[in-house]
Image: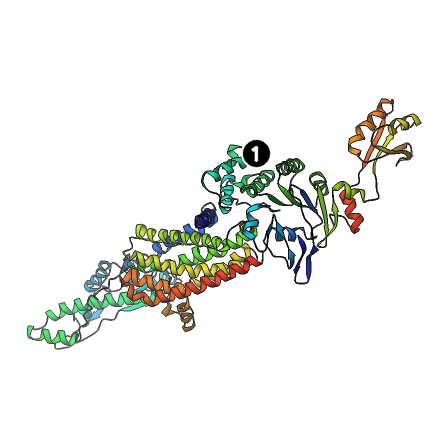
Amino acid sequence: MDSVTKRFEDLVAVDDLSISVAKGELLGLLGPNGAGKSTLTKMISGMINPTLGTIKVGNFSVQDESIKVKEILGVVPQDIVLYDYLNAKENLAFYGRLYGLSGRKLSNRIDDLLRFTQLDEKAVKRHVSTYSGGMKRRVNIAAALLHEPKVLLLDEPTAGLDPQNKHALWEIIQSLNREGKTIVLTTHIMEEAEELCSRVAIMDHGKIIALGSPSELIKKVKMENTITVVPDIVSSRLIEQIKGISSVRKVYTAPSENEENESIKVITDCPDEILPDVVSTIVNNGTKVLSVQLSRVTLEDVFIMLTGRSLRE
Amino acid sequence: MKIGRAFNQVAAVAKTDFLGVFRNKTAIFFTLLFPLFFIVIVGFTFGNTGTGDLSRIVVGVVNLDGGLVAVNATDSGNSTIGDLFVQAMESANFTVNGYEEYGDREENGTAAYAISRGDIDAIIVIPANFTETLAFQYTDNSGMPIPTRAHLELYIDPTYPTSSQITQQSILGFTSGFVKEYQQVAVEQTPPNMQEFIRVIADPIIVTIGETKGTRELPWINYMVPGTLGLVLIWSGLNHASMTIATERTKGTFQRMVIAPVSPMVVLLGKLISAMSIVYMSAFIMLLSGVLLFQVNLYWNIPVIILAIFLGALSAIGIGLIISSITKNEEAANSIAVIISVPLQFFIGAFFPLNIMPEAAQVFGNALPFTKLVNAMQEIMTRNLPFDAVIPEMLYLTASGLILFTLGTIAYRITLKRL
């Protein structure tokens, strides 16, 4: 994407944006609503043309070689875009035929993707209107995979899903990336970007304001991941033992919130991994753990640092 | 290869669009069942009008003939001809209700009470001296009959102008026939050398109603059925086309089609085929139900009927595409389609002839392609005229179909830029 700008009358939705995505990469476009993510995906998919600049998918120009781009690009829209009155198989057959598939090739591809959607035989024959949100999402993704695209564009793929379905879908996205598909994923959920993306572009007001791996971006924030533990007794021996846990950068004590007990603050780069070790060290010392609090630096903090606003605002 | 692929894509779009109607109860009702429902209602309501069935006309008869009247200073109570008149009415198939008196609209059981409530369509009051008058019982001192006319009173319920006119014409027609029968009998009582002379004086002009060549009398339903083809175009063609793109755009399926390697014209062609199929299916149901349920007796010039429906449907679908493209979502498209199609159906000559409408309405109605279709179909199906006779209508349908469908296509292409 080279110097891409999209204007809607006075509104500049995408402002002189340049970025390239490597083959096999999973790039996240993270930003609040109105940041320009959807406009960008519409331009990549050829639904709208940029006002200025050029976009290429593979080696093909979206503006000049749209058919070739469409043949290697799979787009999963944010909304469930399926025909309610058709079943999963009929929906896939319809989209497959639009992409030029027919006959045995189409039916084999549908069978493969129905396995991918994990729908049981009865569900496959039911109209999509009777499916749960998770089932619809999976069929929605399958419909974009029929023509075996090399590049996949996922627009807010987990919007509206419960945590269980969201994690199941993350696994699907990761497996597609492992298969070698280049994926561009738009999201406003920081956990999603952190969990899935090898690189994240944080967007605001039509511009990319930060670009890098999630850990690189987090390091830019002058904050640290902190585990705060309140034991019933704090001893210097306990402090030393905790300092000995690998990945612990610093340990110090401070008054707890209720000010009755002292708390131990543990600074680390990987709080999730060492939390069990910290707790077990305290318990093995014959000390009770009264409370544990984990404070992690996230991409949300990166966004707040860069814009002064929350992603959800 | 490319043609095969495009054909496959067109078929996919058409099939999916078609299933959208057949798997949606509301769409099935308005597209297919409503025309059937309509023809059934129309058929049972108006199916037999125009066939001279007088049993629908309910006449209240106050037969005072037989009451005592003074004739030549003597009381007479003869009711022979009055009774004959009533019997003749019943034989002519009028529904006759007898009443004792004309009465008052507030007085239950009287003829005036019944007509004021619409229970009867007309009242005939037969005077007490009906028989005596017609039997020439009034004589002068020398015994010569005094020429006296019998005086029937006829009252028509004027509430519904059209039906009151039909009632009046039917009763006057019957009375005229009865008078002729009476004249025949009366003339035979006169000396033979005078009979022909009297007949000529009584009936100086004879009007012969001959059978018009190449025409036939048809019940109204036979005119309605070809007319309903115009309604099919509006209900199925215009309404379906106005909803199809708007609905897909609202749901996002249209956008998903656009990002596939499909030409927008392929999508449009698929939609056109689906809409045409629905129009033809709807027309087939309408015509078949007319034939099966009401035994309509029409002429079936199938190629011309198919061609006319195709040309008319192009106009309907063109208007639908324009509506679909200029509206923001399916609700707005539906509202505009209803606002346009509901009044439109009264101007196409399907329900009643355009020539009874005000001048401006006639001009508007005659400009509509659907009116041309109705006219052409009525000419072909009821009058059995050849294709030549409807060439002006067909040319009009072709021109309007091409213009409106082209405008619809332009509007559709503009839609693509607004996604």
* Farthest residue, direction left: B193
User: Residue B94, image x and y in percent?
Assistant: 27, 59
Quadrant in the picture for residue B75: bottom left
Quadrant where the image shows the C terminus of chain B: bottom right
Quadrant in the picture for residue B57: bottom left
Amino acid at the residue labelled 1: Gln
Report the side of B208 relative to A13 (left or right): left
- Callout 1 secondary element: loop
Compared with residue A142, is residue B402 higher up or lower down, i.e. above or below? below
* Residue at mark 1: A118
User: Residue B397, image x and y in percent?
Assistant: 38, 64
- B389 and A305: which is toward the camera: A305
User: Residue B243, image x and y in percent?
Assistant: 50, 54
Compared with residue B362, is residue A250 higher up or lower down, i.e. above or below? above
Any part of residue A92 in sight: yes
Report the side of B298 relative to A310 (left or right): left
* Farthest residue, direction front: A59
Q: Residue at x 28, y 56 (%)?
A: B300
Any part of residue B346 in sight: no
Report the side of B330 relative to B41 (left or right): right
